[in-house]
Image (cartoon, rainbow, N blue to C red):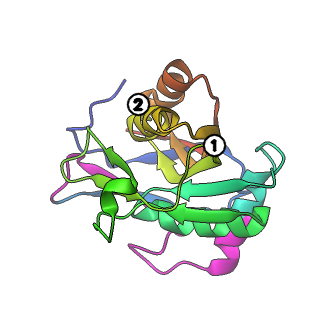
């Protein structure tokens, strides 16, 4: 398993469910707890993204997910999970929400999650209630710690996590195994990559 504290300059697509549509490069992070960021062409943060591509990727990812339930909510984590939650919910014709670092109104009633492996990551999920059934979606899964720990918090709130999914899965960091061990759920990803 690789070390997050090291920078990696090479990224290789190992399994491509995007049919060659995803473009990736490894770049250095300047002020994060991880030294490498995968720049991609579908989130729209480090470069512009084509909305049709994001929609098509979410349509492909959706084929790997369980059937839609009537009361389902697609949930993403701030920041890049916002884009994924909106598009995947559109594909699934479901509701969606995402976390925010902001405290609004009766913020103490929101589902609160402190992402332990990140320096500045307190998440507030507004609108989630006990009994909700959700799908967690991210743009990229590396270690799996964030979604695995969030799943535990959501379950403590009596919220059922139906699936965990992402467009990208960086396989060098053991995220898939950690998610399975900590949550009992299989990670569903569209594209698997290795960094070196």
Q: Is residue 189 visible?
A: yes
Figure check: 146 above or below 62: above
Q: Which residues are magenta?
A: 31-56
Query: Label 1, on which residue?
Result: 131
The residue nearer to you, when weighing 167 against 148, is 148
Query: Which quarter of the picture shows residue 173?
Result: top left
Q: Residues within 10 Å of mark 2 (few under 14, many from 20)?
A: some
Figure check: 38 above or below 192: below
Q: Residue at x 68, y 59 (%)?
A: 20
Query: Label 2, on which residue?
Result: 173
Q: Residues within 10 Å of mark 1 (few under 14, many from 20)?
A: few
In the rendered structure, the answer to whether residue 64 lies left or right of residue 24 reads: right
In the rendered structure, the answer to whether residue 135 lies left or right of residue 9 reads: right
Q: Return the x and y of residue 195 as percentages of the image width and height.
A: 41, 41
Pointer 2 or 1: first along the chain: 1
Does the stretch in magenta take in 40?
yes
Q: Return the x and y of residue 169 as percentages of the image width and height.
A: 53, 42
Q: Residue at x 48, y 22 (%)?
A: 182
Figure check: 174 above or below 121: above
Q: The N terminus appears in which quarter of the rendering? A: top left
Query: Which quarter of the picture shows residue 165?
Result: top right
């Amino acid at each position: 398993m690789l070390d997050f504290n090291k920078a990696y300059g090479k990224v290789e697509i190992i399994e491509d469910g995007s049919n060659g549509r995803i473009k990736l490069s490894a770049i250095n992070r300047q002020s994060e707890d991880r030294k490498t960021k995968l720049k991609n062409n579908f989130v729209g943060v480090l470069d512009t993204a084509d909305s049709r591509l994001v929609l098509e990727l979410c349509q492909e990812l959706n084929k790997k997910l369980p059937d839609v339930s009537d009361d389902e909510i697609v949930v993403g984590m701030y920041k890049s999970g916002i884009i994924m939650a909106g598009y995947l919910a559109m594909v699934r014709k479901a509701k969606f929400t995402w976390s925010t670092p902001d405290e609004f109104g009766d913020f103490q009633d929101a589902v609160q999650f402190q992402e332990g492996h990140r320096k500045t990551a307190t998440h507030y999920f507004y609108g989630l209630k006990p009994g909700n059934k959700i799908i967690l979606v991210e743009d990229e899964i590396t270690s799996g710690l964030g979604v695995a720990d969030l799943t535990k918090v959501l379950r403590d709130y009596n919220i059922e996590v139906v699936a965990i999914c992402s467009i990208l899965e960086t396989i060098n960091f053991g995220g898939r195994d950690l998610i399975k061990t900590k949550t009992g759920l299989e990670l569903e990803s569209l594209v698997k990559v290795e960094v070196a």
